[in-house]
Amino acid sequence: MEVFVILFVGLIALLMLGVPVAFAMIGSSAMVLGYTRGFDAIPMEMIAQRTLYGVNSFTLLAIPAFLLIGRLMNSAGISDRVFNIARTMVGHLKGGLGHVNVVASMLFAGMSGSAVADAGGLGALEIKAMEDDGYPTGFSAAVTASSATIGPIIPPSIPAVIYGALANASIAGIFLASIIPGLFMGLGLMVMVAIISHRRGFPTRARARFQDFTAALLRGVLPMLTPLIIIVGILSGVFTPTEASVVALVYCLFIAFVVYRSISFREFVSILRATAIDSAALMLIIAGSALYSWVLGRYQVTSLVAEFLLSTVTDPLGLLLLLALFILLIGLFIDSVPALFLLTPLLVPVIVQYGIDPIHFGVVMIFTLMIGLITPPVGTVLFTVQKITNLPFGVLVRETMPFYIPLFIVLLIIICFPSIVMFLPNIILN
């Protein structure tokens, strides 16, 4: 019990002091080792070995590739093409550009795999277009923030790759399992956009002609093939998820440099530098979480948590609801990626004992953490959108609150009806 307290209270205390997540995980793990072995006998060599072991994974090589793809898409003018396709599809509905915002995020999700990349790249374009069309900045920002959370749900998804690697679960299975929840998510947000648009009397545009749709589709069809390459390549067995990310990256480079010619060499160097910084930060977190996970297992913390839950909760559905609430609380204070590294090694052994499929649980966990991205006080996507719009944070949160309703409804659906989540993996992967 003392180890449990030191491990979690130490981590929270270090985070509150402003220590970066990776070093907070390493520090709290070192506290436990010092408490159990003596602070003068902390095994530094073992700490170094365990942290290095955490990043020694072929699967994790997909992360920098997906990060680079997202930055390339944002810098190569792809966002405009995707937005125009969405405009010709749903721009005629009541509150048209609100629906365009959601649909564009669903289309762009298959290329970026990151909520922050969606909000910072495509989101800036969406907000400007909505403001130019007379929509209030608060509503535009709220729709953009909410729809950006679709990015890590619809595959490919960086959180799905991370969870699959940590939980030793099929990444292809998680990709497939995320498609239907991602579509439900988009439809739910569009229903809320329609309700708000009717209440506020937002404008309606004329339906786009079929020629306009086909012209927009032709301009944007090449980048939209990126997720198809990834999914089909993985499911056909032609390449692994990591190899798929590299193939998709080469394809995106070909589009940006040869077809569209929209990126200069200097811009590409800047993109590489930014991707390297993001990748390094993620790899540090992965290294720290590897040590943290080892300490969890070494001192049987996961077994203690499992025994406690087994003695208090007997129903798998009740457990999932309880864990979703717990994950949401963690997501209020910790960003989604560090939360995945923190929670996956702790909770996956528990849900397995209840007979819950790790793929189903992974979708629930990722979905819940995405809600945390637009929830104060830490909500990364909220701060990204606030930086674009310069709205007061309280105003942005107030405008975003109605969009929590469809997100929580979809979360309850995927928790209570696992067959919806597992339909595609069961059909395609048997």
Image (spheres, rainbow, N blue to C red):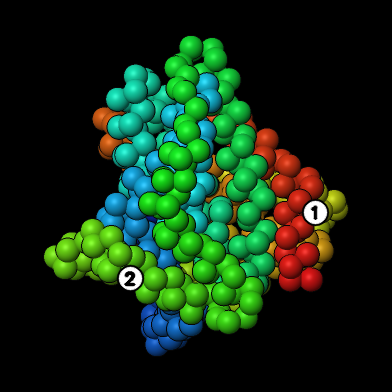
Q: On the picture, is 103 further left or further right than 173?
A: left
- Res 172 seen here: yes
Give whichever of 342, 419 is nearer the camera.
419
Taking the spot 36% from the left edge, 28% from the top edge, the residue there is: 130
Secondary structure under tag 2 reads: helix
Q: Which residue is mark 2?
A: 254
Dividing the picture into quadrants, the one containing residue 198 is top right
Q: Is residue 99 above or below residue 285?
A: above
User: Residue 253: image x %, image y %?
Assistant: 32, 69
Q: Amino acid at mark 2?
A: Phe
Q: Is residue 390 left or right of residue 224?
A: left
Comes first in the chain, label 2 or label 1: 2
From the viewer's side, name the closer residue of 325 and 130.
Answer: 130
CA separation, marks 2 and 1?
39 Å
Residues packed near mark 1 inside 10 Å, few (<14), some (14 to 19) or many (20 plus): some
Residue 208 placed where, x, y %? 47, 32
> Dot 1 corresponds to which residue?
419
> Measured along the vertical axis of the image, is residue 275 above or below residue 298?
above
Residue 25 image point, x, y percent: 44, 65
The answer to whether 320 is drawn above or below residue 282 in the figure is: above
